[in-house]
Image (cartoon, rainbow, N blue to C red):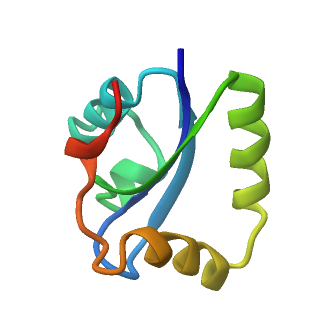
Amino acid sequence: MSHFVYILASRPHGAIYVGAARDLRLRVEQHRSNAVSGHTRKYNIKILVWLEMHETMAAALLREKQIKRWRRAWKDELIEKLNPNWDDICADIPF
């Protein structure tokens, strides 16, 4: 089973959210339907712009915490390496 670290954005270079999940499709849908209160709802953050797979949830959570501590410019660079146009990559989530 895969575990994911992901970044959602409101728009290119807009507000972002870094999270971790076991079922990424379900988690993105929760964000998009406003079932998740807080930062993502407040700033309308719904576009999946980056993801990374991990073998264990512990590894995913460690990576999530690492990325959350980064400067914003580093997070933008991470996104743009794989997704330079900040496109929605939800359809690319591996099963």
Q: Residue at the top extreme?
A: 1
Q: In this view, does 64 lie above or below 80?
A: above
Q: Residue at x 39, y 34 (%)?
A: 36
Q: In this view, does 55 lie above or below 42?
A: above
Viewer-closest of 94 and 3: 94
- Percent across and percent down for residue 8 are 40, 56
- Quarter that holds the C terminus: top left
Residue at 77% over, 26% down = 58
Q: Quadrant of residue 20?
A: top right
Residue 14 drawn above or below residue 61: below
Q: Seen in the image, is 42 located left or right of residue 5?
A: left
Q: Where is residue 30 in the image (x, y as percent from the top left)?
A: 31, 30
What residue sits 31% from the left and 29% below the top? Answer: 25
In the rendered structure, the answer to whether residue 92 lies left or right of residue 76 reads left
Number of marks in picture? 0
> Could you tell whether 87 is left or right of 74 in the image?
left
Residue toward you, 21 or 37: 21
Residue 66 lies in quadrant: bottom right
75 left or right of 81 in image: right
Residue at 34 percent of width and 57 percent of height: 45
Residue 37, horizontal then vertical, whole percent = 41, 38
